[in-house]
Image (tube, helix red, strand yellow):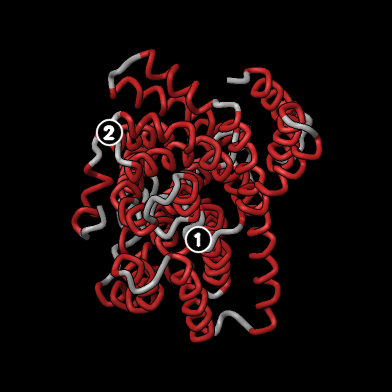
């Protein structure tokens, strides 16, 4: 392994981050510095350009902008509000009812849009003021909103799982999507357990029990939105269309639904599309830069070196999985999900496959680790969004946030050491 190349790349990367440069630029410049150190300048620049072009030349990646746009339409088209109403009527009468509403709404929203940031923004802006009005701590409300939004990154459709499928060299997106259901539900249920105990301790109020008629009304109102889940995931699992085609169908369906609800006007569409383009540009730039850094690491034989080092520490599967989880939790604190998946999947996947761990199972483990990372400083995108929506500060939200993150780590360990939780549904549908 060329140690000097890795050291140079790491020093430049962390140095640029310390100067406040966006992570995508830091990754790209660090990769360029390492490639220039390894190769002739002309060859280095040509190689980097080739990596940039080939990294985005993927039919699979087309699913990402479409799912992002579908999420934007959901947010503005009245779909998110109807899901929140359904969640309120389902679980609002439990202890800490509005916290449960936030968690269930995040799972429902994530199962359709697949965006944690969109879920935290949409749900937090609606429920945050209501929770404050009912006596909930603003910081606890923010912590619940931030952590519950992560379930949308595990429950399909998930853009991060699509990125993992690309980075792992062709793991089935349909299998990954189906594998995410039970772990995502576990994340939500364990957060609901925390919310129950915390609400009983703080004596937070419950909402009145909803009548069956009102529950049925809210269910029927949200049913067209929930049907999108059946159409998209059912179509992918049955083989009727690919994940990319499903993303296009999701956009068309949400547009029709928003038009039927009458809450999205035609003049608002260009602004929505522009917002989706901006978000997509950031994601694709991260992918492009991360692929180049992954190439640098591969050229320097870093994956083989790390694999040998970890396997030399122990041949015990449990020990190695714990070490990998610790590594990914630390990585998640300093790196956004997309580059982390693209850079570390080629490094860690050979290790776990050598231990007989299914790539689909490992994909869920990796995404759950990084979900925890985006809730923590210093690079926690979801943390910053949730704090901003709630109108509080990171310092104040850290204590209640830890109350939610520790159970999420417990859920991560359950998924790590109980593979069937991820693999049972794919086997049931004949996908693995």
Q: Which mark is residue 60?
A: 1
Residue at x 56% of width, y 53% of height: 117
Dividing the picture into quadrants, the one containing residue 316 is top left
Dividing the picture into quadrants, the one containing residue 406 is top left
Point out residue 58 in the picture as x, y percentages from the top left corner.
55, 59
Secondary structure state at the residue bearing disc 2: loop
Residue at x 60% of width, y 27% of height: 300
Q: Residue lying at the far top in this picture: please name it.
A: 313
Q: Quadrant of the N terminus?
A: top right
Q: Which mark is residue 356?
A: 2
Residue at x 41% of width, y 54% of height: 98
Residue 144 visible to the viewer: yes
- Specify which label sits upstream in the sequence, 1 or 2: 1
Point out residue 332 in the picture as x, y percentages from the top left corner.
53, 34
Which residue is more in the foreground, 397 or 105? 105
Point out residue 365 in the picture as x, y percentages from the top left corner.
38, 39
């Amino acid at each position: 392994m060329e140690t000097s190349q890795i050291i140079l790349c790491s020093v430049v990367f962390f140095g640029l981050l310390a100067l406040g440069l966006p992570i995508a630029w830091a990754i790209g410049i660090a990769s360029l510095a390492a490639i220039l150190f390894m190769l002739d300048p002309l060859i280095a620049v040509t190689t980097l350009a080739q990596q940039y072009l080939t990294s985005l030349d993927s039919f699979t990646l087309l699913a990402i902008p479409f799912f992002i746009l579908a999420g934007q339409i959901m947010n503005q088209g009245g779909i998110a509000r109807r899901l929140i109403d359904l969640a309120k009527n389902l679980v609002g009468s439990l202890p800490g009812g509005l916290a449960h509403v936030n968690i269930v709404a995040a799972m429902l929203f994530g199962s359709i849009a697949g965006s944690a940031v969109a879920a935290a923004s949409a749900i937090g802006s609606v429920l945050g003021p209501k929770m404050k009005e009912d006596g909930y701590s603003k910081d606890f409300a923010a912590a619940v909103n931030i952590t519950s939004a992560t379930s949308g990154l595990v429950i399909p459709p998930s853009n991060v799982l699509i990125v993992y499928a690309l980075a792992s060299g062709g793991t089935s997106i349909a299998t990954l999507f189906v594998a995410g259901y039970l772990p995502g539900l576990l994340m939500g249920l364990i957060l609901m357990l925390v919310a129950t105990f915390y609400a009983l301790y703080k004596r937070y109020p419950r909402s009145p029990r909803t009548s069956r008629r009102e529950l049925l009304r809210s269910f029927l109102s949200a049913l067209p939105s929930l049907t999108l889940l059946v159409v998209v995931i059912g179509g992918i699992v049955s083989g009727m269309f690919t994940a990319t085609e499903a993303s296009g169908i999701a956009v068309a369906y949400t547009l029709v639904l928003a038009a039927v609800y009458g809450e999205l006007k035609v003049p608002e569409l260009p602004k929505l599309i522009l917002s989706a383009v901006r978000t997509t540009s950031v994601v694709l730039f991260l992918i492009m830069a991360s692929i180049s850094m992954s190439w640098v690491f591969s050229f320097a034989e870093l994956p083989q070196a790390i694999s040998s080092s970890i396997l030399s520490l122990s041949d015990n599967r449990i020990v190695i999985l714990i070490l990998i989880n610790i590594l990914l939790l630390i990585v998640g604190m300093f790196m956004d999900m997309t580059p982390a998946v693209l850079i570390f999947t080629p490094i860690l996947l050979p290790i776990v496959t050598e231990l007989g761990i299914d790539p689909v199972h490992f994909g869920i483990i990796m995404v759950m680790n990084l979900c925890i990372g985006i809730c923590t400083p210093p690079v926690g995108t979801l943390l910053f969004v949730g704090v901003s929506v709630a109108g509080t500060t990171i310092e104040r939200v850290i204590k209640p946030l830890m109350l939610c993150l520790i159970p999420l780590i417990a859920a991560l360990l359950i998924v790590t050491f109980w593979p069937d939780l991820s693999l049972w549904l794919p086997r049931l549908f004949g996908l693995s």
